[in-house]
C-alpha cells in the first residue's frame, strides 16, 4: 500500500497541495487498490484540508471512494479501481 505522510509539510500550503496531487496521480497510475494519506490527528485542520482536496471534482474522478479510518482518525484511506 502506498503511503503519504504529511507531518513534515503541515506548515506549507503549496507543498501540501503539490504532494497530494502528485501522490494521488501516482497511486492512480500504479495500479494500487488502496493508498493511505496520513495528516495526523492534531486539531483536524490538516485532515479537513486533505478531504477538501480529495473532494475537488477533477480529483474525485481519479478514485472510487475515500474514508477516514475508523480506528485511527489521523489516517485517510483512498480506494482506486
Image: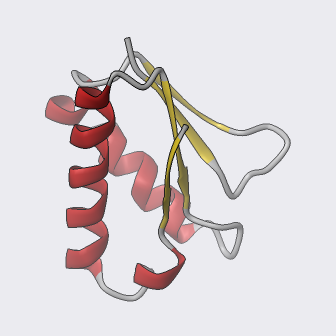
Q: Is residue 7 above or below residue 26?
A: below
Q: Is residue 9 above or below residue 26?
A: below
- Name, please, the residue furthest toward the left: 58
User: In the image, 71: left or right of 79?
Assistant: right
Q: Residue at x 71, y 67 (%)?
A: 41
Q: Residue at x 72, y 39 (%)?
A: 69
Q: Residue at x 22, y 52 (%)?
A: 21
Q: Quadrant of the N terminus?
A: top right
In the rendered image, residue 71, in percent from the top left (x then y), is placed at 85, 42
User: In the image, 3: left or right of 12?
Assistant: right
Number of marks in picture:
0
In the rendered image, residue 24, in percent from the top left (x then y), is placed at 30, 42
User: Looking at the image, what colour scheme do you see?
Assistant: secondary structure
Q: Quadrant of the C terminus?
A: top left
In the rendered image, residue 64, in percent from the top left (x then y), is placed at 40, 16
Residue 57 sits in quarter: top left
Q: Residue at x 44, y 47 (%)?
A: 51
User: In the image, 12: left or right of 57?
Assistant: right
In the rendered image, residue 13, in percent from the top left (x then y), is placed at 27, 78
- Name, please, the residue furthest toward the top: 81
- Name, please, the residue furthest toward the bottom: 11
Q: Nearer the viewer, residue 44 or 70?
A: 70
Q: Is residue 11 above or below residue 77?
A: below
Amino acid at each position: 500500500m502506498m503511503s503519504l505522510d504529511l507531518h513534515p509539510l503541515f506548515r506549507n500550503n503549496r507543498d501540501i497541495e503539490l504532494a497530494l496531487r502528485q501522490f494521488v496521480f501516482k497511486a492512480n497510475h500504479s495500479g494500487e487498490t488502496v493508498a493511505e494519506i496520513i495528516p495526523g490527528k492534531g486539531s483536524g485542520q490538516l485532515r479537513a484540508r486533505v478531504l477538501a482536496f480529495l473532494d475537488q471534482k477533477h480529483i474525485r474522478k481519479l478514485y472510487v471512494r475515500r474514508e477516514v479510518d475508523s480506528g485511527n482518525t489521523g489516517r485517510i484511506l483512498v480506494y482506486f479501481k
